[in-house]
Image: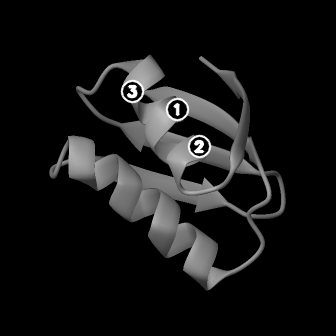
Amino acid sequence: MLTLHVEGMSCGHCVRAVTEAIRALDPRAEVAIDLATGTVRAETGAEPRAVAAAVEEEGYKVTSAA
């Protein structure tokens, strides 16, 4: 399970954009996003750096990944 802390997400569009960015790397990824805390949890086989980069390409700032 990969957990990212992401700044700049505030709505359903943000959830879709981040989810689609992660699923572009791993179509079978399971993604859960908590807008209130800015937490993205992804069950994925994709490399954490690639996932963080994909989220940042959508215009969001990843502040930590674990």
Question: Against 21, is 6 above or below?
Answer: above
Callout 3 touching callout 2 (CB < 8 Å):
no
Q: Which residue is mark 3?
A: 50
Locate residue 20 relative to residue 36 in the image: left or right. Answer: left
Q: Callout 3, which amino acid?
A: Ala
The furthest residue to the bottom: 12
Q: CA distance from mark 3 to mark 2?
A: 10 Å
x 50%, y 59%: residue: 18
Q: CA distance from mark 3 to mark 1?
A: 5 Å
Q: Callout 1, which amino acid?
A: Ala
Locate residue 57 relative to residue 24 in the image: left or right. Answer: right
x 74%, y 63%: residue: 9
Q: Callout 2, which amino acid?
A: Glu
Q: Position of residue 54 (x, y in %)?
A: 44, 42
Q: Label 2's element?
A: helix
Closer to the chain start, of discs 3 and 2, is: 3
Q: Quadrant of the N terminus?
A: top left
Q: Which residue is mark 1?
A: 52
Q: Label 1's element?
A: helix
Question: Against 15, is 23 above or below?
Answer: above
Q: Position of residue 2 (x, y in %)?
A: 48, 27
Q: Residues within 10 Å of mark 3 (few under 14, many from 20)?
A: few
Callout 1 touching callout 2 (CB < 8 Å):
yes
Q: Which residue is mark 2?
A: 56
Of residues 35 and 51, which is closer to you in this image? 51
